[in-house]
Amino acid sequence: MKLQVTQENLNRALNNVARVASTKNALPILSNVLIKTIDNRVCIAATNLNIAITHYIGSKVSEEGSITVPARLMQDFVASLPSGIIDIKVDDTKLRIKADKYNSTINGTVADDYPVMPQINNGSTWNVPAAELKKALQQVILAASNDDARPILTGIFFHTHEGHLYIAATDSYRLAEKRIMPLAQEVKLLLPASAMQDLLRIIGDADEEIVVTHDDQQVLFTVGDVELVTRLIDGVYPDYRKLIPTSFSTAAVLPKAELVNITKVSSLFARESAGSVTLDLDEDEKQISIRSIASQLGENTATASAKVTGTASITLNSRFILDGLGVINDSEVSVAFNGKLEPCVIKGVEDKDYIHLIMPLKS
């Protein structure tokens, strides 16, 4: 293999791909990235057998070929090179790199043994605007569980409901759901949140559309010159819609910034109680107040004016409130619930497509 690429293109490809390579895997070759030529382009790829990312970059290819080299070393080395043209040549299992005044050799292995994800044949394909999917993932992914003992809850659930595409995530303590767009075909996909984090890093501001192709085992996301393939999580996602109330006896509407401020202040006193704060909605006083008590530190009540319907209180995790508010883009938000034992729903007043539901704590 013999070729020329720019440092900028190779560095961007390695940054997208190399994080998937795992040094903890039982197969040593999975800590490498694959570099190979395809039709006058260079393919940079890595996989951990559950997720695979491939980035294609333009190049001047003199000789076709392939090799795998240690991902971390290659990524750090190319990032350290000055911008400009890089000459790459493969001699047997050695990758020789020339750039400006740098002349280096990286020991690699033959690419024949590098695993590849199976092809998706006869799968379903649909498109989604890149900006819409990126925003949706940012709003939903925070609610996915980190507990591998319940693998289904570590996933992001893509599905269609009443002719629209939704994505949702829950760790059983809270739920985030986003309606993205109308979609005629039926979709029901449970994807690892870790793979969706990688997808988020890949989607750039200039990307306009993402092509999604899937069968009953895996999903391929094509974002410009980058492809991400991930295996589906096996299992049935819980019927979370039963949790979402259709009407509320108590609700408050107020500026998001004010709710953020009073929650932050109260959360300082809630550290002892694992973030537990009590929201009081008072229709007569037209206000919402948040109370927190720390036996060692003291107590705090922070209040804000609001449009309030009904009078009631509920105890919630303050971190979950702040997480939900952090991904809502509206200037005004609503907080609504049906008594202290029912879930609380936080959403933007203008954005009807996103909800953040929080289960109550025992007060």
Image: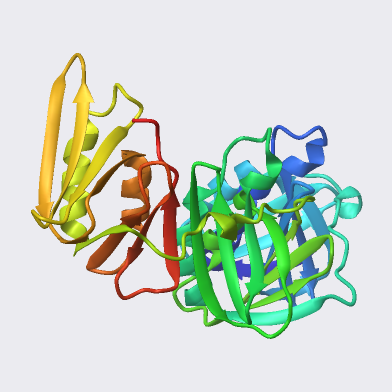
Q: Position of residue 21 (x, y in %)?
A: 69, 45
Q: Is residue 31 above or below residue 196?
A: above
| Residue name at image x 61 percent, y 42 percent | 73
Q: On screen, 302 above or below 191? A: above
Residue 15 picture quarter: bottom right
Residue 340 location, x and y as percent? 36, 42
Residue 258: percent from left, percent from top = 15, 55
Whether residue 104 is visible, yes or no, is: no
Position of 77 relative to 245 (above/below)? above
Task: Give the quarter of the image for residue 213.
Answer: bottom right
> Which sits in the foreground, 196 or 203?
196
Residue 283 in the figure: left or right of residue 250: left
Left or right position of 260 against 9: left
Above or below — where is 324 with respect to 280?
A: below
Which residue is at the far top? Answer: 296
Inspect this view and state whether residue 184 appears.
yes
Which residue sits at x=20%, y=53%?
A: 259
Viewer-side residue, 22 vs 285: 285
Q: Is residue 238 left or right of residue 354?
A: right
Closest to the observer, 71 or 351: 351
Q: Quadrant of the C terminus?
A: top left
Residue displayed at 49% across by 41% down: 173
- Image quarter of the N terminus: bottom right
Indicate the position of residue 314 as horizontal and vertical percent values.
31, 42
